[in-house]
Image: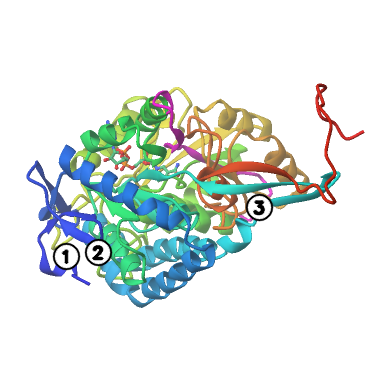
Amino acid sequence: MVDIVKEEKSVGHLINGEIKYSNGQILDVYNPAKGSVSKQIHVATRDTLEDAILTAEAAFPLWRDTPVLKRARIMYRFKELLEKNSDRICQLVGEEHGKISHDAMGELQRGIENVEYACSSPEFLKGEHSKNVGPSIDCWSEFQPLGVVAGITPFNFPAMIPLWMYPLAIVCGNCFILKPSERDPSSTMMIAQLLHEAGLPKGILNVVNGDKDVVDMLIEDQRIQAISFVGSTPIAEHIYSKATANGKRCQALGGAKNHAIIMPDADLDNAVNQLIGAAFGSSGERCMSLSVAVVVGNEVGDLLVSKLQDSMKNLKVGEHTNSSNDFGPLITKEHQDKVTSYINSAEEQGATIVEDGRNFVVKGCEDGFFLGGTLIDNVNTDMLSYKEEIFGPVLQIVRVKTMQEAMNIIDNHEYGNGTCIFTRDGEAARYFSDNIKVGMVGINIPVPVPVAYQSFGGWKRSMFGDLFAYGPDGARFYTRRKTITQRWPSNGVREGKQFSMPTMK
Ligand code: NAD
């Protein structure tokens, strides 16, 4: 396998099992800890995309008819190769995303679990069978692949999120075109190459790099049957409406504002630890980051804020290479400026900046896109910093008097990705999970990302589409049900003409 990053300073495309370059635009990829350009990425042209689509179309008939056990066995080998190459993959994630090695390893492990789920495809693709639905009549459903499908992924999990998509799509018999984030494509490319090393025939997985224009070509192309998208809400909404208008199946996962309710009976020291990890891990650049703590009762509020403040003094922020760091830089200078502007606006609108991460400098990385952990108290729901997704290391405190008030606030927010409650009261927790209008709920669990054999998705404007990502919903998304009813008349028995609707009386 060519180590694309060691040997190449430019990132091309992976089409028909080979790295190819295009003659179009070139984009810079940054090392965000240093603030410097580390690589360049070739943007796919229409010809590049045509090459990928024709390759995938040509590979489909043979792949569709390949026994599912054979497809699954490639995934077993893929899992082994991912584990064997995990250090290198995480290094690439660190270099381009800035994620600290322990966090990158967690991301990769979550991705591998999706490959493990794909290994069980002979089980979940068995279909449904009903024998003797009528005299000598059997009826069954089978799940057939769609054809060529595509995935578009965000920067924040360059290893994991593509693994939510193509192992499952491919094991279901589809061919896949992936458009990774243009900000940190190298680990994604390496992982796609490993799948070929694991024995995937050429043409089944193709990776095209680029940005918006490549996505527009993908969602307009009639030969692509389905689109999986993960990214910000405005783009998710645009992609969902355009892809479905073009007759495609689409699941488009968007942004988030994840609230934690802190009840007066919560184990506060535990809640503080969980909040700190979930708010600042990965610099807050997770769609399941906890960005708002809604505290029930002013006394608990004061105590929580003072404990958070104490604990935040020990946050270690720096380069991915030092595994004792808690989190790294933000992805780009523009994003660093945007997060800073949200902190400025909260201050201007009357919130209290308790811990201020603005103007944070890491020694030796003076040009890096760093921001320190920031804690903002006395936030209200009219503030811009409350309404919008910040996607940075910023935790905001909203104070309320009752649990119902806290739940109303969460329900009224436009996003509904994740939420959690910290309490010792089982009845309150059950009421919360039964009634809250959010797709993924934690009870004393701060980042309730479902395991690979469940499925992942938000409610409200955090997701467009009906089937969640990965797990059982993912398998349904990448397949089409076909239902067959069959009769083999025995002993020459013939049916007469029947003009009424057939029934089983
Ligand atoms: P983004 O929306 O900017 O980009 C996502 C993908 O869309 C990229 O591949 C990008 O090239 C492409 N893209 C960007 N602009 C486009 C446009 N105008 N038209 C078509 N395609 C376009 O998101 P990001 O900054 O890479 O990632 C962060 C966002 O993703 C956050 O909002 C985060 O909450 C969200 N996210 C959501 C989930 C989830 O599961 N719900 C998971 C991870 C990230």
**How far from the left and from the top, in percent, is residue 103?**
38, 63
Residue that protrudes farthest toward the front in the picture = 492
Residue that protrudes farthest toward the right in the picture = 505
Of the numbered discs 3 and 1, the one sitting upstream in the chain is: 1
Q: Is residue 401 left or right of residue 474?
A: right
Image quadrant containing the N terminus: bottom left
The answer to whether the residue labelled 1 contacts the one labelled 2, judged by CB atoms less than 8 Å apart, is yes
**How far from the left and from the top, in percent, is residue 148?**
38, 45
Q: CA distance from mark 3 to mark 1?
A: 42 Å
Q: Nearer the viewer, residue 141 or 149?
A: 141
The answer to whether the residue labelled 3 contacts the one labelled 2, judged by CB atoms less than 8 Å apart, is no
Q: Residue at x 69, y 40 (%)?
A: 432
The local crowd at label 3, few if under 14, some if 14 to 19, many if 20 or more residues have their Cα within 10 Å, is some
Which amino acid type corresponds to the residue marked 3 in the rendered image?
Gly
Image quadrant containing the C terminus: top right
Against 79, residue 22 (above or below) is: above
Against 117, residue 22 (above or below) is: above
Q: Nearer the viewer, residue 470 or 206?
A: 206
Labels 3, 1: front one: 3
Judging from the image, what secondary structure is the residue with disc 3 in? Answer: loop
Labels 3, 2: front one: 3
- Magenta extent: 244-267
Is 256 colored magenta in this rendering? yes
Q: Which mark is residue 92?
A: 2
Judging from the image, what secondary structure is the residue with disc 1 in? Answer: helix
Of the numbered discs 1 and 2, the one sitting upstream in the chain is: 1
Against 43, residue 219 (above or below) is: above
Q: Quadrant of residue 406?
A: top right
The residue that disc 3 covers is 127
Q: CA distance from mark 1 to mark 2?
A: 8 Å
The residue that disc 1 covers is 5
